[in-house]
Image (cartoon, rainbow, N blue to C red):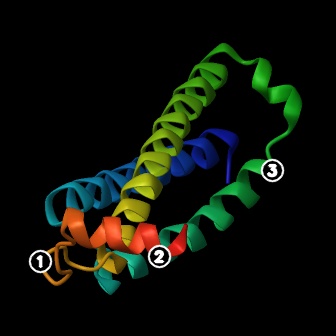
Amino acid sequence: MTQFEAIRDHQQLCDDIHQCVLEENRFLRQQQRVPDAALLDRKRELLGRLDTTLGALRAVPAASARDPELRAQLEKTRARILQILQLDKENEQLLLRCSLAANRPAASNAPAASVSMLQKIYARCS
């Protein structure tokens, strides 16, 4: 595999990962719940492919990064990776909100405490 093929394959995979993370983001925003197993399986499969493409990139000689065309491709890939990381961070925050909301008891189930009841409790404890 040539260095250009390795970078092209890695770029394509980064684009696939970006699309998957975007879908997850849309799902979390619209459904406000943890994604289905199918999306999680897809992410796992993409991670497996990522290991393969990273191995191919490591085989590319470092001196070849001085080539202007290759350098431009690497910068494009880095920019895509930054987008993925930013979206993934947002998805983690959305997942945290979803999990906290799912564990929170419904407000309608809890009886409303009256002011006089709270004053009595406070008077007993003080």
Please tell me the numbered disc located at residue 58. Answer: 3
First reached walking from the N terminus: tag 2 or tag 3 = 3
- Judging depth in this view, the residue of 76 and 111 nearest the camera is 111
The Cα atoms of the two marked residues, 2 and 1, are separated by 27 Å
User: Does 114 sit above or below residue 106?
Assistant: above
| Residue, disc 2 | 124
- Judging depth in this view, the residue of 66 and 14 nearest the camera is 14
| Residue at image coords 41%, 82% | 41
* Amino acid on which the number 1 mark rests in the picture: Ser
Going by the picture, which residue comes out furthest to the top?
A: 68
| Residue at image coords 39%, 49% | 18
- Tell me where residue 20 sits by quadrant: bottom left
- Judging depth in this view, the residue of 121 and 50 nearest the camera is 121
87 displayed left or right of 57: left
76 displayed left or right of 63: left
- Badge 3 marks a residue whose secondary structure is helix
The crowding category of the residue bearing disc 3, from other C-alpha atoms within 10 Å (few below 14, some 14 to 19, many at least 20), is few
The Cα atoms of the two marked residues, 1 and 3, are separated by 57 Å
* Amino acid on which the number 3 mark rests in the picture: Arg
| Residue, disc 1 | 108
Label 2 close to label 1 by CB (< 8 Å): no
